[in-house]
Amino acid sequence: MDKIESNLTGLRYAEEQTIKVLPGVGGADAVWYPLEPNSYTDFGGEITTVKRNPITASRQNKKGSATGVNASGGFAQDLTESNTTRLLQGFFFADAREKATTASLKAARIPITGVTAADDEYAAASGLGGFKVSALALASGFAIAANNGLKKVSAATATDVGVAQPLTDEAAPPATAQLETVGFEFATGDASLSANGNKLRLNSVAVNMTTLGLIPGEWVYLGGDGTTNRFGDDKHGFCRVGAIATGYLEFDKSDFDAVVDAGAGKAIQLFFGIFIQNESVRSLIKRRTYHVERTLDQDDNGEMAEYLIGAVPNELTLNFPQEDKVTVDMSFMALDNMQRDGTEGLLPGTRPDIVEAECFNTSLNFSRIKLSVLDNENSNPVPLAAYLQDIKLSINNGATANKALGVFGGFEVSVGNFDEIGSVQAYFNGMDATRAVRNNTSCTLDVAIVKDGIGMVFDLPLITLGNGRLSVEADTPVMLPLDTMAAESRFKTTMTFTQFPYLPAIASNV
């Protein structure tokens, strides 16, 4: 073997039980999740050395010594529905807030043991009690097509979930079969819209809204594909929960103005998903550390690999360039690195296959882009710019390795504040945005992308804008470059992410 082709390398990561230590005896319980890197930045360990240079007539240095290692690594990959969400928990230092699911990001999968047509039920040994009656559940991974898709829960116990749609007997579903809560359907005529000033409210008489599992700051999608499942063709869209009471959800951001609609004859559907935010309560802040594995093809004895050990998620950048795909850059600060040849082989653990998914593009997959002045009394304010050309959203955890005498590499990692600094290139269309920069006006920015019934929302609830120096060039539109500097919002968070495992077709702009 004279060389290794880069196309024969691979990238995976496993969450550590404690820093530098994989779960299970010898790491046997580690799960190595695959990634799809487009490129790498400084992956591995840089060995630091010191030389001996005594005063001597020979005027020659003596052999020195290796004194330490600086380990880190980064990579860029396309954003898909399946390759980033789990890792975002690490970058946000938080657990994902999930609704009832058999495929949690934080716990072992609950196997579905069977499907019964006579009762239209999914069965498991345990763990199904979290599913609520009238919840909308997405069934996927079943071998029989009729058992997949959006289902309305009609009954639920710890071992069975009954649904309103007909199912087909399936005695042994594949290991990939799963159920996850993706929304809720209100009884016909129960849900209505009202206006609290210029803020939109979704009201219910029969449903206690505090039991839906939502929190202020979380995004939802109001309305389904069926005409009886939405208030109207101009009354559906993404909304952010601003306040929750027993009888209503109040939205402080919405795709349409605050209106009144009794919802007569309508069984309104509401969709939601996985929610991640940087937490402010100490008990909810969770640092995750990882082994990151880069395989390097095979030598004469087997698979070779190099590892980052004790890797703390440090910097993340979301890139939304014009007429391109959405990409994400991730980098880790690690305590050590390790190389293993074919004789030693890969570290133990389970290595699932990649979940194939398409990327999001920046021409067809935006459903919402809104930069506006922060207005807590108006859920649908006028945007500061009609069109944006480019967006970058970056977070930095300020991770640094702690070094000590007697330690080769680092023994721990310290982190700083959760810091977000981004940039926007906007088409200039008036003075409102430039004045918002000058006046240090509180603003907000959110981006929603949707493709093939899957959606994501990235939200900066409170930002101030910088730069604002107009770019004027011959024969081109006047551009307004803006910097975004996020801060702790009224929700006690700086940035949030919502992933929708299922969205109706009307959520897409195409």
Image (cartoon, helix red, strand yellow):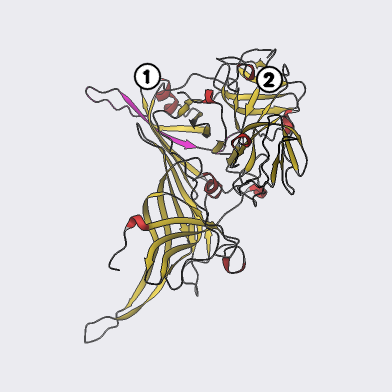
Q: Is residue 259 left or right of residue 308?
A: right
Quick check: 56 above or below 271?
below
Q: Quadrant of the rendered structure where residue 496 is?
A: top right
Residue at screen point 45% across, 28% down: 366
Residue that mark 2 sits on: 267
Q: Residue 223, labelled with which disc?
A: none
Report the magenta residues as a range: 468-494
Q: Residues within 10 Å of mark 1 (few under 14, many from 20)?
A: some
* SS assignment at label 2: loop
Q: Is residue 239 left or right of residue 134?
A: left
Rendered view: 334 above or below 89: below
- Report how far apart the C-alphas of labels 1 and 2 lie in the structure: 41 Å
Measured from the top left, where is residue 95 in percent x and y?
Answer: 61, 47
Query: Residue 127 appears at what percent x and percent y?
Result: 73, 46
Type of amino acid under label 1:
Asn
Query: How many residues crowd around disc 2 within 10 Å: few (fewer than 14), some, or many (20 or more)?
Result: many
Indicate which label's residue lies in the foreground, 1 or 2: 2
Count numbered badges in the picture. 2
Which residue is identified by label 1?
A: 429
Percent x, y for residue 192? 69, 17
* Mark 1 or 2, nearer chain start: 2
Observer-nearest residue: 152 or 219? 152
